[in-house]
Structures are given as structure tokens and as C-alpha cells.
Amino acid sequence: MKLKDLTSFLDSAIPLSFQEGYDNAGLQVGLPDKEVASALITLDVTEEVLDEAISKSCDIIISHHPLIFTGLKRLSGRSYTEKILLKAIKQDIAIYSAHTNLDVLNSGVSRKMAEKLKLKNVKVLLPLKNKLLKLVTYIPENHFEKVRDAVFNAGAGVIGNYDKCSFSTSGTGSFMGGENTNPFTGEKGKLHFEKEVRFETVLFSHLKGKVINALHDSHPYEEVAYDIYTLENESIDEGMGCIGELSKPIEEKDFLNLLSSVFSAKGIRYSKLTGKRITRVALCGGAGGPLVNDAVASGADVFVTADIRYHSFFDAGNKMLIADIGHYESEKFSVEILYNLIIKNFPTFAVRFSEINTNPINYL
């Protein structure tokens, strides 16, 4: 298949609009019309990973961490990033990344951590904000189901684990077509009244174009009346971090040993033990320091994350244990998310896990 078919799917399944402002998710190297037959999935793009992709004849590297974070003014091979980019271009290997947009996904990095720890009753810790829209439109009664279904099929109407969510009410619309119109019903130049259904539903902002196109394509009117409202509602399932519960309480030291075993974490840094047993577990893959107070407010007994700064260990006080298991260790299972997502939708596409440990941190 063409590279653009794969990246278009990934851009939609892991919406680029979900990424943080500093991030650089998406296609970084590669021509959209390039044919691709196999992918190598990795946490980081290193020169060793690129060599592995070359040796395994992979057409694209799909990573969690982007290779390019900041703007480039030259490609001369002076930096590590430039060397990899030049080599990838020469070898015609595409590079695609899903970073903070994968973090906030309902089935994203923190949820994968919760799955590995076998947590139950898992909920988002810091919900995604300012990404929801409401669509309101007016549809003639005999076309209502066709238009409604087209809008739903475009991705609108999803609230948490429910889809096809909407509200509708009947009323009477009016319009008068001008000289250059060709009205679906009524006559131009004459005021017309039509039995219509007011239809409203919600959608994520990244689906706006797709949903509006579906509305126009399915609606019988020459000019479709609709409104788009920005909502202040928080997303029910998407957001940074998550919190869940162990099947039974365990001692803090036993929980730290569990973390070491599940995540192969050999250098866990942790705050002063509280003396409480662990039941409620807050998680955030990667650098979750900014969520410490959110974890405390959620009533978590422990917050598991990475890259905690010195002074942040004080923030939990005696209310909560903080466990820093390492950045690589907290995000290592993101490759499974990407693999399963691709295989489910492209079952004949060859996807391989990188065998390179890209963790740049060593422990004595």
C-alpha cells in the first residue's frame, strides 16, 4: 500500500490534534506516494534502529518518540538527528511518530501501564480539554435517517463507550430561494415552510472536516444550514495519565517490587514511604511530574511515572507515595499499542518489533 494510506489511518486513529503544542507527531520523513510493505516499531529512532530497519528491509520506522522535535535549519550531518535523517532519506526509509497524541488516547500509554499492572476501574487522571465540538443542523423529515447515519459514520456522536449519541426534535423551517437557486423543495422566489428535524451531536475537533463533508454529501438541500459550537466539556476517556485499583491492597515495598518486575525497572526512585497499603494507583507514562498534584487530588495511594524532579518528591508529603520507574521503562509497551492498532486494520501488512534497547540511561 501507499505510505499515505497508512499515515492517514494513523493520523485519524491517533489524532494529531491531540498532541501537545511542543510536540512533532506524524510523518517526519517520506514521500506520501511511496509504496510500503513492512514497518519496524520502536520507542526511539536511533542509528542502530535505522540500521536494523535497513537489514530487515523495512520501508518505514514507526516510533513513539519523534526524531525531530525542533526546527532544522540545515541537513549537513553535524548533529545526531541530522545524521539519521540523511541516512533515512538515502535509504528511502520513512519515519512516523505518535507521541503525546498516543499518551492521551483512551487506549494509550498510561492505560497500557494500567493493563500490565492488571488494574480495574481505570479512569483518566487529567481529562483532555477544548477538543469537543457540537454540531447542530436541520434536516427534512424524509431524509433524517440518511443524514444522521452519514454524520455518525464520519465519527460524530461518540461519548465515552457510547456511539451514535444525539438529540433531535421536530419543527418547521422556512426559506426563500433567490433567482440563481435550485431549491430541493418549494419554488424560488416564494417563501417555503418545511417540516424538519433539528439534529445535534458531538464530535472531536479533528473530525470536523470529515463530518461536515459527510453532512453536505448526504443532505438534500442546496445550502445546508448548520452551526458548530466549541464545548468546554472535558473528554470522558481521553487525557493524560490514568488511575485505577489493584484487585487487593498490598504493602508499599511489595508494590515497588511489583513495578520492578512488570516494567523491568532496575533503578526505581521513590519518595518517603507513607506506611499505608496501596490500592489506588495513578499512572503517567513518560515525564509525569506536572501531574503530581492531580494524583494527590484523585486520592491515589501511589503515583507511578518518570523524570520526577527533586523538589517534586516533596509535593506528595505523607499523602501519597511517588515511584519514578524511568522514562524508557514507563513507555516501553507503547510499541504494543502501535503494533496492535496497525495489525487490526492492515492484517496483511508486515509489522516487526525492533530488537534494539534504545534506553540511553544505564544504572550502576
Image (cartoon, rainbow, N blue to C red):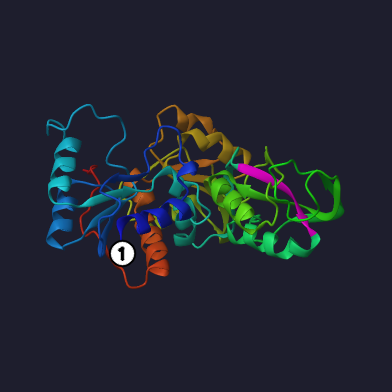
Q: Which residue is mark 1?
A: 1
Q: Which quadrant of the figure contains the C terminus?
A: top left
Are there few (<14), some (14-19), or many (20+) residues within 10 Å of tag 1? few
Q: Residue 157 is drawn in which quadrant?
A: bottom right
Residue at the image position 49 percent from the left and 55 percent from the top: 111
Percent x, y for residue 213? 57, 51
Determine whether the residue tagged by mark 1 lies in a helix, strand or loop. loop
Q: Is residue 73 above or below residue 84?
A: above
Percent x, y for residue 269? 37, 41
Q: Is residue 55 magenta?
A: no
- 109 or 30: nearer the eye? 30
Q: Is residue 47 above or below residue 72?
A: below
Q: Is residue 312 above or below residue 273?
A: above
Residue at the image position 69 percent from the left and 64 percent from the top: 146
Q: Is residue 119 left or right of residue 30?
A: right
Percent x, y for residue 238? 56, 49
**Can see residue 281?**
no
Q: Which quadrant of the figure contains the N terminus?
A: bottom left
- 135 or 158: nearer the eye? 135
Identity of the amino acid at label 1?
Met
Q: Is residue 80 left or right of residue 6?
A: left
**Range of residues picked out in magenta:** 132-140
Q: How many marks?
A: 1
Residue at the image position 42 percent from the left and 62 percent from the top: 341
- Residue, far front: 179
- 196 or 131: nearer the eye? 196
Q: Is residue 33 left or right of residue 290?
A: left
- 306 or 132: nearer the eye? 132
Percent x, y for residue 116? 44, 61
- Magenta residues, dominant SS class: strand
Q: Is residue 324 above or below residue 264?
A: above
**Can see residue 51?**
yes
